[in-house]
Amino acid sequence: MDNPKDQGTTHFGFRDVPLGDKQKLVGEVFSSVAGNYDLMNDLMSLGIHRVWKRYFVATAQARPGDRVLDLAGGTGDIAALLKERVAPRTARSDREVGSVVLGDINGEMLRVGRDRMTDRGRVRGFQYVQCNAETLPFPDASFDLVTIAFGLRNVTDKDAALREMRRVLKVGGQARVLEFSEVKVDWFKPVYDFHSFNVLPRLGKLFAGDADSYQYLAESIRKHPPQDELRAMMDDAGFARARYRNLSGGIVAIHDGWKD
């Protein structure tokens, strides 16, 4: 079957759209859900996303004093957890006080994240950059760790984003991807599909007044490369020792790669 990209198109959920349109369409989705982003994740994961995110950060290669880039940083929940790892309150010197750059292509999402951090008194050590993961505005070897959580599936050119993540990593640095993936438990697949395509859009309409955005998000998960394919993409992007770990039976997976 022909690859839509070979014909100048890509997927937006289950629809094929011109390559140049996807970024705009995805932007409209996230501008729509920005104010209810946490609710969206709660509905999509039944609240378990909070556990996944904590595990994702707790097991990352992050040390006091590191500089970290969190892409598709959204409302800042991953960035806040990362800051606790790289700038702990027990830091004994400035060398142990790292920083987190929260990057997102969507200005509304970035604003929500910045305002949330400010309201919580978390100002020092954060930087906010509106940027496209496919063309990062940072020099080579800028970060010790680059993360992207629940964002890679919305990127038009995932291969370009993975290459950029590697480029901005320092030698020895780690890239981590947390993303909805392919369910591996056979009996759970029909339950998961029913929730995604019948329950989730209705909940989105009920709680956020937006069924279409939630329908797209469910579809985007099914179009995202499954575990082994994404690991191969990380290999092709130049990462060393690319690997993945399934969580909750493959509902999500954590992918890792290093820059040697």
Image (cartoon, rainbow, N blue to C red):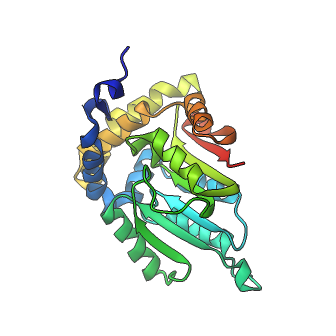
Classify residue 237 as left or right of residue 171. Answer: left
Position of 9 relative to 131 (above/below): above
| Image quadrant occupied by the N terminus | top left
Position of 157 relative to 91 (above/below): above
Q: Quadrant of residue 119?
A: bottom left
- Comparing 209 with 75, the one in front is 75
> Is any part of residue 93 visible from this angle?
yes
> Is any part of residue 48 visible from this angle?
no
* Residue depicted at x 52% and y 53%: 148
* Residue depicted at x 28% and y 50%: 29
Classify residue 40 as left or right of residue 231. Answer: left
**At which x and y percent is residue 75?**
43, 65
Task: Please identify the residue farthest to the front as the structure is shown.
Answer: 140
Task: Please identify the residue farthest to the right as the structure is shown.
Answer: 92
- Comparing 183 with 231, the one in front is 231
Q: Quadrant of residue 244?
A: top right
Q: Quadrant of residue 257?
A: top right
* Residue depicted at x 52% and y 60%: 70
Classify residue 216 as left or right of residue 59. Answer: left
Classify residue 202 as left or right of residue 76. Answer: left
- Comparing 197 with 245, the one in front is 245
* Residue depicted at x 25% and y 46%: 25
**At which x and y percent is residue 12?**
30, 36
Task: Please identify the residue farthest to the top as the structure is shown.
Answer: 1
**At which x and y percent is residue 23?**
30, 47
Say how many tags the image has.
Answer: 0
**At which x and y percent is residue 183?**
54, 30
